[in-house]
Structure formats: structure tokens, C-alpha cells
Image (cartoon, helix red, strand yellow):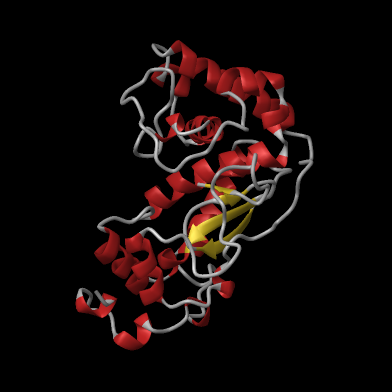
Amino acid sequence: MPLQEFTSAPSNLLATPIRNLGLKIAGTRLEPIVAEFRQQLERAGIRRLQPHFYLSTEWGVPFDTISIAIPFYLARPDLTALHAEHHGHVEGFNRADILRYLRHEMGHVVNYGYRLYEDPEWVKQFGAITQPYVEEYRPEPFNRRYVSHLPGWYAQKHPDEDWAETFAVWLTPGLDWRKEYEDRPEALRKLEYCDRTLKALADRDPVVIGQELDEDVGDLAYSLEQYYHASKLGAASFRAGWTDRSGPSSRTSATRK
């Protein structure tokens, strides 16, 4: 079914290649949110590692980079409304929600920037990063071994996500994570590891500073209609080289959400 049959968006917008929409972070509602997030990092003592932000098809961090992808549809209200109309929800529906996702993605940036996944203690707490990374997973609701930050008990998806969620909880302003998780000893141990590690890294430069971009908005030659039609069908991409999400064990360019 053509997208225009179930949306009020004008047909000329739907037919426009996404790269021709002139989307960027600067000058949009995202700009002050990103600035606020940078302040959160500064207050948390994360000063040597400066993430790069760009627009893409979804939230994510390409493996072995410090680049955070923000969904392009969050840069314009009409595109946000179109996405909500098509998907029924938006990951980043307001300022607080966008900051929540940024905290999670920054967990990946810290992991890759300092290659924490090579630390035996990291592996002991979270597991090997080379474990298979699959999109479909079956979480155990309210499992007390994991923290809760993003919806869907996301920490249970993969060790990399477990770390990113733990980091996000640690970074959340105003949250007393020790009290919040005092009755969940395994989750608390992960948070304490995160706290020790971030304090130790405060004055260290990252070992990875790559800013490779996966599906940068300026490279998206397909239209909004094609994009949403593909997502409806479960198609991964329109161009060769779309990110393989099986994890860094198969492709080092894999992007983690």
C-alpha cells in the first residue's frame, strides 16, 4: 500500500530523497538537547571523550567509533509526526526521552572509545562482546541481575547493551543508583564497576577517536515513502553495505543501538 494512502503528509515530501531534505542538528530542537547532554557528561567527569553526533535512520553507535546516530525524523516536527503515524511510537518523543537515549548510546561510545570490552573485569561483569548479537531476543521481565533504563528490558539483549544500560543508569542526573539497586546485588555490582571505571578514566584520553558514520542522513538516496515501505516489509536497506547488525564478531562496522 502506498504510504500516501494512510498518511496526511504531502506527496512531494514523501517522494523526496531523504538526503535532499536538508536535515541537520544545528538550528533544530536537537541542538539545545545535545548541548545539555554535553553538560551532563562534563558534570559526570567525562571530559576527555567527546562524542560526535549525526543524523541517521535510527539510534546507534557504529562499532569502534565515538559517533552517536540520532534518528533523522527527530530533526523536524512534521517528520516526527509522520514516524509516529507509521510506527505508532517515537524513540525520543520529548526532551527527556531523547536524553534517555543519548545516555544509553554514550555507554557504547565509552565502551568503544576505551575498549572496555577487552578488560577481563568487564567480561566478568557483562560477558564477552563477541556473543551473537540478534535483533529478536526474549527478555525475562524484571530480572534482578540487570538495570532498567530503556523500555523492553534492553540490558538483557547482549553484553554490550547490558553495559550501555548500566552506564546510562549511572549517568542519570539526580538518580541515587546505590539506593535504587541496593536490593539487586548483581546489578549493583555492575554499577559499582561502572563507577570505578569512569573515575579511573577521568584523566585518560580515549584510545579510539574514529568518527565513521553509518547511514549518514546526507547519504540516504531513497525517499521517505521507500524508507517506510521497507521498514514495513522488514527490509534492511536500499543500498549495498547497509549495516550488518550481527555484531563486531562478523563486521567491525556493525552498529549497536
Q: Against 55, is 171 above or below?
A: above
Is 210 on the left-hand or right-hand side of 229? Answer: right
Q: Position of residue 45 (x, y in %)?
A: 65, 36
Q: Against 35, is 240 above or below?
A: below
Q: Position of residue 117 (x, y in %)?
A: 67, 30
Is 66 on the left-hand or right-hand side of 231? Answer: right
Marks counted in the figure total: 0
Q: Position of residue 256 (x, y in %)?
A: 55, 46
Residue at (31%, 26%) from the top-left corner? 141
Q: Is residue 195 visible?
A: yes
Q: Nearer the viewer, residue 219 or 179?
A: 219
Q: Position of residue 18 (x, y in %)?
A: 47, 76
Residue at (25%, 79%) from the top-left corner? 4
Q: Quadrant of the N terminus?
A: bottom left
Residue at (38%, 66%) from the top-left corner? 230
Q: Is residue 46 visible?
A: no
Q: Nearer the viewer, residue 218 or 36?
A: 218
Q: Nearer the viewer, residue 231 or 219?
A: 231
Residue at (52%, 63%) from the top-left corner? 56
